[in-house]
Image: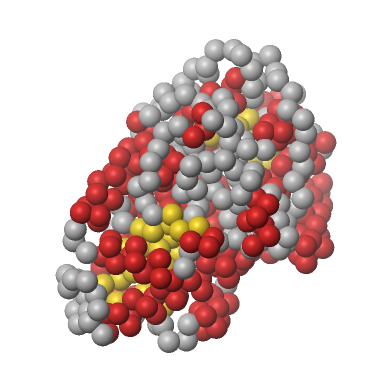
């Protein structure tokens, strides 16, 4: 692809909008790839976190200021969220980007896409919401407002192509990451851990509301595990526990303030010492077991290969209403990819310190449960790396329950604080057409490079008009 048009008058100007830790990681990688591919300077502004800032994106809005979870929890935050939304639009009007890249975070980004289309700015949507599983009325928003979808699950390509949406499968960004290279000893030295003890990783989520809801039960389980180890109640001796003691490690997402997290830990369980880190993947790699909130972190755990327990909790009223909108046999991404329960799912009222302790103890032991999960996580890793790229798309909620289909994070409507905008689903001429052909991909190219090529193509096409 020639970039002559993009270089002709001024640097390429890109707006990126990412509202969660995983999305802003993808955004940072994408920006780095854009600069590697594009011969001229790339200017970037938008919404994200520290990783995007470090990659050179000017943050007009910090994602932590709008990342609110829950259907009713958002009400007190709405004025601030709308203020941040219009602050970003003001910069869009002033800077007139060549292309906008919206990463997941649908309640915010679908509204943003509508405003961008009205301004004549092409929109690339990177990492698709699970529209095939629920709230399919949003598909019309994609058809109307999005120039191209970049999907990370193979069968999503066919889903969008059949519905008349320009789409490219670029691969799953996490599946190609090399394991962290930091040694256990170096990691322990950096974060004040004892390398001789057994580490248990706690990942309560990347947003404040998630952490407030998930952390208390996690720390309650940590207290029970510590008390059991101290009194010798563990079922079997653990190979790395020293005197039967555990250490708890908690990576802090870039969307959260570390001191605020410390305060939450102190309020929940002053008797449990938790070591905070800034590296989720290394924390999982060196932990014996993880307790992981549903979301992207479960994919990271599966790809690392660490046995873990999946947990999640939302506010009671949100759960009562939201559970009827999602009809799936599992909530966990790993289990839905596998088509069966690979990791335990402790959701809502089932998410208690006692249940977490019991499941963690079963995985700490060198026994059948631990070995079986390690083997089954290996199968999931294969699927996430594209070995099932020919999987059919789910054409109905019932088909969405079949093995190998796309997982859904249990998040209620309005998860980012903006009321969901929906429209009646209208079939397009591509609805009953043939499956989309495989997207051309150069061997060895990273997901970020493939995504960057697509973004540059859309930007160049828009400039030519």
Foreground residue among 345 and 406: 345
Residue 90: horizontal and vertical position, in percent?
A: 82, 52
Name the side, left or right, on which 102 lies relative to 293.
right
Quarter containing the C terminus = top right
**Closer to us: 452 or 366:** 366
Picture coordinates of residue 288 (x, y %)? Answer: 28, 64
Say how the picture is coloured: secondary structure
In this rendering, would 313 be left or right of 320? Answer: left
For the N terminus, the quadrant is top right
Q: Quadrant of residue 130?
A: top right
Q: Is residue 397 left or right of residue 221?
A: right
Q: Quadrant of residue 159?
A: top right
Q: Residue at x 41, y 23 (%)?
A: 390
Q: What residue do we see at 50% from left, 52% from top?
A: 295
Q: Tell me what residue is drawn at x 64 percent, y 46 percent.
A: 324
- Return the x and y of residue 380 as percentages of the image width and height: 35, 41
Is any atom of residue 337 visible in this view? yes
In the image, residue 320 above or below residue 405: below
In the displayed structure, 321 sits above or below 232; it is: above
Question: In this orientation, which residue lies closer to the viewer: 173 or 229?
Answer: 229
Residue name at image x 74 percent, y 23 percent: 426
- Residue 120: x %, y % from top left: 79, 34
Q: Is residue 6 above or below residue 179?
A: above
Residue 103 can be seen in this image: no
Q: How many marks?
A: 0
């Amino acid at each position: 692809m020639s970039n002559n048009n993009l270089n002709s008058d001024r640097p390429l100007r890109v707006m990126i909008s990412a509202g969660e830790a995983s999305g802003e990681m993808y955004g940072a990688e994408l920006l780095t790839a854009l600069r590697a591919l594009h011969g001229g300077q790339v200017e970037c502004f938008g919404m994200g976190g520290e990783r995007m800032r470090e990659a050179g994106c000017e943050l007009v809005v910090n994602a932590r200021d709008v990342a609110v979870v829950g259907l009713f929890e958002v009400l007190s935050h709405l004025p601030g969220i709308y203020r941040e939304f219009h602050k970003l639009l003001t910069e869009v009007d002033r800077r007139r980007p060549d292309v906008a890249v919206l990463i997941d975070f649908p309640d915010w980004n679908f509204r943003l896409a509508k405003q961008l289309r009205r301004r004549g700015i092409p929109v690339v949507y990177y990492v698709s919401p699970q529209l095939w599983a629920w709230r399919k009325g949003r598909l019309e928003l994609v058809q109307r407002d999005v120039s191209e979808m970049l999907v990370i699950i193979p069968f999503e390509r066919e889903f969008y192509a059949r519905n008349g949406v320009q789409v490219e499968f670029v691969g799953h960004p996490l599946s190609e990451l090399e394991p962290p290279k930091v040694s256990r000893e170096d990691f322990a030295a950096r974060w004040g851990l004892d390398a001789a003890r057994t580490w248990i990783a706690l990942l309560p989520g990347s947003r404040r509301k998630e952490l407030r809801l998930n952390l208390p039960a996690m720390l309650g389980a940590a207290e029970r595990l510590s008390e059991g180890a101290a009194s010798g109640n563990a079922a079997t001796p653990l190979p790395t526990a020293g005197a039967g003691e555990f250490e708890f490690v908690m990576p802090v997402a870039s969307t959260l303030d570390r001191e605020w997290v410390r305060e939450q830990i102190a309020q929940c369980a002053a008797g449990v010492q938790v070591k905070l880190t800034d590296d989720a993947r290394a924390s999982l790699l060196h932990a014996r077991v993880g307790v992981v909130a549903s979301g992207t972190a479960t994919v990271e755990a599966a790809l690392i290969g660490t046995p873990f327990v999946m947990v999640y909790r939302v506010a009671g009223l949100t759960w009562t209403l939201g559970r009827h909108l999602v009809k799936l046999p599992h909530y966990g991404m790993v289990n839905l990819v596998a088509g069966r329960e690979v990791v335990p799912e402790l959701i809502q009222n089932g998410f208690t310190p006692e249940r977490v302790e019991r499941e963690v103890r079963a995985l700490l032991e060198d026994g059948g449960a631990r070995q079986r999960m390690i083997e089954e996580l290996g199968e999931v890793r294969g699927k996430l790396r594209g070995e099932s790229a020919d999987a059919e798309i789910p054409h109905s909620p019932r088909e969405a329950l079949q093995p190998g289909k796309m997982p859904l994070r249990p998040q209620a409507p309005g998860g980012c604080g903006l009321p969901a905008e929906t429209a009646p689903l209208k079939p397009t001429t591509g609805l009953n057409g043939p499956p989309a052909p495989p997207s051309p991909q150069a061997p060895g190219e990273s997901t970020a490079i493939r995504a960057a090529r697509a973004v540059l193509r859309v930007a160049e096409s828009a400039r030519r008009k």
